[in-house]
Amino acid sequence: MRIIAGNLKGKKLKSPTTDKTRPTLDRVKEAVFSMVSSYTKDAKVLDLFAGTGSLALEMISRGASFCLINDREKNAISTILFNIQLTNTEKYVKISMKDYLKCLKKITQDEMLFDVIFIDPPYNSDYAIKSLQYISDNKGKVLTKDGIVVYESDKSFLDNKYDNIENLECINTKFYGRVVIKIYKWR
């Protein structure tokens, strides 16, 4: 696993020694970043289920100004901290070790807004739909007016409820083998 573009290009990142974290494959990451390239410069980014932090660190490498990196697993946090030190990106990130809903509620309470939000939870959970619904229900309190949400899943866990979120519109869907990427923006 590595940074694939930007000023940190080629930097190898550590993966956690647990099966609870599923790092995004380089080919999928390349596809995601070709879809979101116009959103990277000076972006404020939330990586809600960060795992290794590779998506947030890729955004920093490509010009994002700040990333809130969240994961509730202790092993993931230690991997993220290692990768932040490895890439010397400490001044661009803040770490959060919270359940995803507690993290979203804290963001709302602190009045933080993000241009790009990555949601890549465990595939067999309902965390994604609950995260998308929270963002939708709190319009203007988590995602900027021109921001996007990037959601990654396995196609076997996807159904039409992900296309029918009240305030969010799915503007792009791509399949990469079993992996599906959906991009949302405000309706």
Image: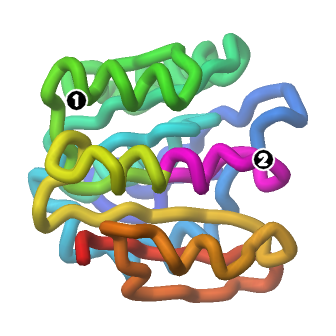
Near mark 2 (Cα within 10 A), the count class, few <14, some 14-19 or many ≥20, is few
Please report whichever mark, 1 or 2, sits nearer to the chain's N-terminal start.
Answer: 1
On the rendered structure, is 146 left or right of 34?
left
Q: Would you place residue 182 above or below residue 47 in this image?
A: below
Q: Amino acid at mark 2?
A: Ser
Indicate how the structure is coloured in the image.
rainbow
**Which quadrant of the view contains residue 109?**
top left
Residue 57 seen anywhere in this rendered image of the structure? no
The answer to whether 31 appears left or right of 41 in the picture is right
Relative height, residue 76 to residue 22 (above, below): above
For label 1, the residue is 92
Which of labels 1 and 2 is toward the front? 2
Residue 129 on the magenta segment: yes
User: Circle 2 sits in a helix, a strand or a loop, which is it?
Assistant: loop
Q: Is residue 110 above or below residue 6?
A: above
Q: For mark 2, what is the residue?
A: 125
Instruction: Please tell me whether residue 74 is drawn above or below residue 159 in the rendered image.
Output: above
Judged left or right of residue 44, residue 93 is right
Is residue 31 on the magenta stretch?
no
Q: Quadrant of residue 45?
A: top left
Residue type indicated by callout 1: Tyr
Could you tell me residue 67's position as x and y percent? 29, 36
